[in-house]
Image: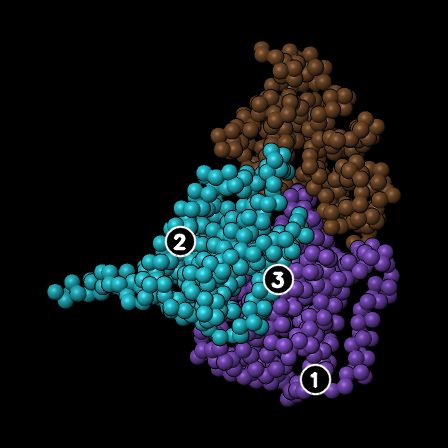
């Protein structure tokens, strides 16, 4: 495949991101676009873990929370520079992921679900309880993100920041999948014992991808915190983990495009339903069930298969 | 020195001794077969040698180095490859990608470099695609290269496993019933393929039920019965051994 | 004299924590039995199990509010979740049989969101309760107080456990379920209707959860969102006891309840809800098959 052809999808995404401001009527829509991009980046990472490597995480919001609160706490209470705090958050999230991953990934299926879920819930409870630092259930304000005298503020500036981040993540995720590392990841999903015999140290790969997805989740937690200017413990709770997983599943497991579509659709949904309290939960639940029954591979792979493209190219 | 030496190898599951005090050695360049009635412990022996199980007792040496209890992915590094009795194909990938996974250890597996798509990685992967195609031609699967593995017929998957194992450039290859479930024409093709592999300089250790094939291509044969070594020798020696005949016909000796 | 006093306070304090631990642990045990039942029959971990606990409490409250006598309200509050369990099996699990573990986990999570969302829409976000079954005058035991409702919780849990034991070891229906869990194909071949077995196990496990909810609510209150935590802790109990073991589920439930209460009492009550999850991480790290789980070897 030529370099140009390989990069078509990247160029299309870039074009969409460039043109979008022309049709976004006001800041409310900018805000939705920003949230979509934030979710899309987290979901890209999570899909590497769930869709490509075939593992599960029911606690990823915990890592988002760690990033968000690092960006909130370290500058406010300890005077750190926000960028340094963001890096520290990502480092802490990665470190926690790395430490617990080794024992966790000896487990399979239900046990793995339980362990990741436990990790997420513990994180959320710590955030709720350590009110001296975190403001407890009420949350706390977050300092603005500035660099060399320039402060990122307002929806329009944040939009461009996230457009660049999203393009980079999309490019990097595609590269990763189309590499020996990515191949090993998919192989261990297909057959653990075969990939082991071929020399794949499967635990090392599962750990690496778990850490990477935690890193991106934490980074986006920090971005969310700085963008909104305020954090609450909801960002780390179980429901948020489920939302993120729903995006992976609906868009399409093991599909890079699916991650984008899933994030866009399910970020828009709560906006559409926000006036009906409770229905949002029902809608999420119904979508999960229907999606798993009628298109267990998710939207993008199912449509790709229906329209005759063989899906392998359309990753 | 023999390439593979197995000394007094045993494993027990619960109280059942699936493999008991088995010793043998395989010289470089041979086709070495392991036969025995169902449940004799052949696959268990394979799983022990290739690191899937850890032996309760005994010693395994590859090239003089002890490898008992070493993890499978480390054994791959020492030049060991295998196929499986129940297919272990990655159905979520194309046939070609399956073969490419076989070359895993020869590639740059760095995560960061992969994400940033360093030119070296892209170039090497490109070259690997050609090598993998070549291997698929070698096993007679050239027409399947870009197909998803899940849409391939059973017989082709059996050969795909061999291509994948060969992609690792092994010095010793373990084939666990490569002809199981195949018709006689396909079996003859596998027979020929195994011979081709052996001729290319790879030592082959084979578990197989098809006696015609075993007697045809094996340099030496090990006979297991109830997890114990019954005898070992050339095809002719084994064929004429009364214990072997008794074990297969089930008479009491 | 003083020392003896202190000794007594320490003892009574310990007893107090033990009582509350066993009481809530009994609910976890019922939920854990529900998990185990469904897992045995279908290899599915039903993440919606906690919602049945919530339904048990909430429905009893609603029916009593509408003027029904308590026994009738309770009966309905157990029967309706059982029907919901059947519907869950029929509508969501059945169409996705043979799917991957991850897929089935996601389906049950989806179901739990639907149930919780509907209850929230119907009954709102408020916390509710109803009077204890036989008054709330505490009983004094060794300096600690025991609520009469706790005795109800323990007594009925014990009865349920005995009934289940009888069902599985003495009745044909129970043995059919066991056979199906052991080997579904073989069970089908000897003429067991495995379809029916699935429905029964979902109904039964939903009913078990609901019983737990009905019993516990007078002590702890209930609201539309209590299901997740209770269910998850029930799942912790399952893993502590080892997946697929009935005895393990009961012991695991009590153990989780007691450890939670002790840790909340002696270490930190703020972290009460985190304790089962810290416990589970430790157990998974150091003994991944649980206390009663069997060793299994994978065949290749």
Residue C157 numbered mark, or none: 2
For the N terminus of chain C, give its image quadrant: bottom left
Q: Are marks 3 and 1 in contact (CB under 8 Å)?
A: no
Q: Which chain is tinted brown?
A: B
Q: According to the rendering, which colour does chain C have?
A: cyan
- The color scheme shown is by chain
Seen at 63% across and 49% down, the residue is A201
Q: According to the rendering, which colour does chain A have?
A: purple
Q: Nearer the viewer, mark 1 or mark 2?
A: 2
Q: Secondary structure at mark 3?
A: helix
Give the residue at mark 1.
A28
Seen at 22% across and 60% down, the residue is C142
Give the residue at mark 3.
C110
Q: CA distance from mark 1 to mark 2?
A: 53 Å
Give residue C16's position: percent from left, percent from top. 29, 63
Q: Residue C155, relative to residue B1: is it above or below?
A: below
Give residue C299's position: percent from left, percent from top. 61, 38
Chain identity of mark 3: C
For the C terminus of chain C, give its image quadrant: top right
């Amino acid at each position: 495949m030529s370099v140009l052809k390989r990069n078509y999808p990247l160029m299309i995404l870039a074009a969409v991101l460039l043109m979008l401001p022309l049709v976004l009527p006001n800041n409310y829509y900018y805000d939705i676009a920003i949230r979509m991009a934030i979710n899309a980046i987290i979901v890209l990472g999570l899909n590497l873990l769930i869709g490509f490597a075939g593992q599960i995480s029911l606690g990823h919001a915990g890592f988002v929370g760690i990033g968000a609160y690092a960006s909130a706490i370290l500058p406010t209470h300890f005077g750190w520079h926000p960028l340094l705090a963001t890096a520290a958050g990502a480092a802490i999230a990665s470190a926690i992921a790395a430490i617990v991953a080794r024992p966790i990934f000896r487990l399979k299926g239900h046990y793995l679900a339980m362990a990741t879920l436990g990790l997420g819930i513990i994180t959320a409870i710590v955030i709720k309880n350590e009110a001296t630092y975190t403001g407890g259930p009420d949350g706390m304000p977050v300092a603005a993100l500035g660099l060399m005298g320039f402060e990122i503020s307002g929806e329009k500036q944040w939009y461009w920041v996230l457009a660049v981040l999203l393009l980079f993540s999309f490019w990097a995720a595609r590269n990763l999948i189309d590499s020996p590392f990515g191949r090993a990841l998919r192989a261990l999903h297909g057959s653990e014992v075969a990939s082991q015999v071929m020399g794949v140290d499967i635990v090392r790969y599962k750990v690496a991808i778990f850490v990477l997805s935690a890193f991106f989740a934490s980074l986006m937690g920090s971005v969310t915190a700085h963008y909104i200017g305020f954090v609450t413990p909801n960002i780390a709770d179980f429901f948020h983990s489920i939302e993120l997983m729903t995006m992976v599943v609906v868009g399409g497991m093991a599909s890079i495009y699916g991650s984008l579509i899933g994030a866009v659709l399910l970020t828009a949904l709560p906006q559409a339903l926000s006036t009906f309290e409770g229905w949002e939960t029902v809608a999420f639940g119904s979508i999960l069930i229907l999606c798993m029954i009628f298109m267990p591979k998710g939207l993008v792979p199912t449509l790709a298969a229906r329209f005759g493209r063989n899906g392998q190219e359309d990753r | 020195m023999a390439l593979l030496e197995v000394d007094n190898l045993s494993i027990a599951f619960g109280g059942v001794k699936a493999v008991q005090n088995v010793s043998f050695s395989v010289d470089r360049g041979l086709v070495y077969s392991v036969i025995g009635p169902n449940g004799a412990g052949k696959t268990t022996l394979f799983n022990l040698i290739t690191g899937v199980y850890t032996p309760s007792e005994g010693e395994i040496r590859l090239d003089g180095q002890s490898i008992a209890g070493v993890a499978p992915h480390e054994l791959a590094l020492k030049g060991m490859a295998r196929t499986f009795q129940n297919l272990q194909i990655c159905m979520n990938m194309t046939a070609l990608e399956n073969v490419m996974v076989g070359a895993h250890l020869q590639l740059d597996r760095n995560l960061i470099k992969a994400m940033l798509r360093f030119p070296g990685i892209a170039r090497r992967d490109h070259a690997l695609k050609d090598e993998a195609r070549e291997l698929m031609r070698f096993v007679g699967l050239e027409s399947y290269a870009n197909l998803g593995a899940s849409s391939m017929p059973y017989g082709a998957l059996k050969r795909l496993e061999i291509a994948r194992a060969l992609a690792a450039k092994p010095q010793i290859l373990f084939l666990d019933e490569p002809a199981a479930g195949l018709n006689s024409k396909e079996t003859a093709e596998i027979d020929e393929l195994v011979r081709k592999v052996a001729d290319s300089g790879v030592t082959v250790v084979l578990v197989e039920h098809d006696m015609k094939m075993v007697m045809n291509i094996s340099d030496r044969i090990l006979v297991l019965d109830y997890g114990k070594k019954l005898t070992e020798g050339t095809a002719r020696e084994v064929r004429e051994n009364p214990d072997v005949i008794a074990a297969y016909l089930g008479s009491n000796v | 004299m003083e020392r003896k006093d202190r000794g007594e306070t320490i003892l009574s304090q310990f007893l107090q924590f033990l009582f509350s631990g066993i009481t809530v642990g009994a609910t976890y045990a019922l939920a854990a039995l529900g998990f185990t039942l469904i897992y045995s029959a279908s290899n599915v971990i039903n993440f919606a199990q906690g919602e049945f606990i919530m339904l048990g409490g909430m429905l009893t409250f609603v029916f009593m509010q509408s003027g029904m006598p308590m026994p009738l309200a309770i009966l309905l509050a157990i029967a309706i979740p059982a029907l919901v369990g059947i519907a869950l099996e029929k509508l969501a699990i059945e169409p996705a049989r043979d799917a991957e573990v991850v897929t089935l986990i996601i389906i049950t999570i989806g179901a739990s969101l639907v149930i919780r969302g509907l209850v929230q829409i119907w009954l709102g976000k408020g916390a509710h309760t109803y009077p204890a079954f036989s008054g709330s005058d505490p009983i004094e035991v060794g300096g600690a107080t025991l609520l009469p409702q706790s005795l109800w919780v323990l007594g009925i849990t014990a009865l349920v456990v005995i009934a289940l034991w009888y069902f599985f070891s003495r009745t044909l229906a129970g043995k059919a379920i066991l056979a199906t869990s052991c080997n579904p194909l073989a069970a089908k071949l000897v003429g067991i209707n495995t379809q029916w077995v699935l429905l029964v196990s979902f109904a039964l496990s939903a009913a078990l959860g609901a019983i737990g909810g009905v019993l516990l609510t007078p002590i702890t209150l209930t609201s539309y969102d209590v299901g997740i935590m209770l269910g998850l802790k029930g799942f912790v109990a399952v893993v502590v006891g080892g997946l697929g073991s009935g005895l393990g589920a009961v012991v695991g439930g009590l153990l989780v309840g007691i450890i939670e209460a002790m840790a909340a009492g002696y270490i930190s009550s703020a972290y009460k809800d985190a304790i089962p999850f810290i416990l589970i991480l430790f157990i998974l790290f150091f003994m991944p098959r649980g206390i009663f789980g069997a060793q299994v070897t994978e065949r290749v």
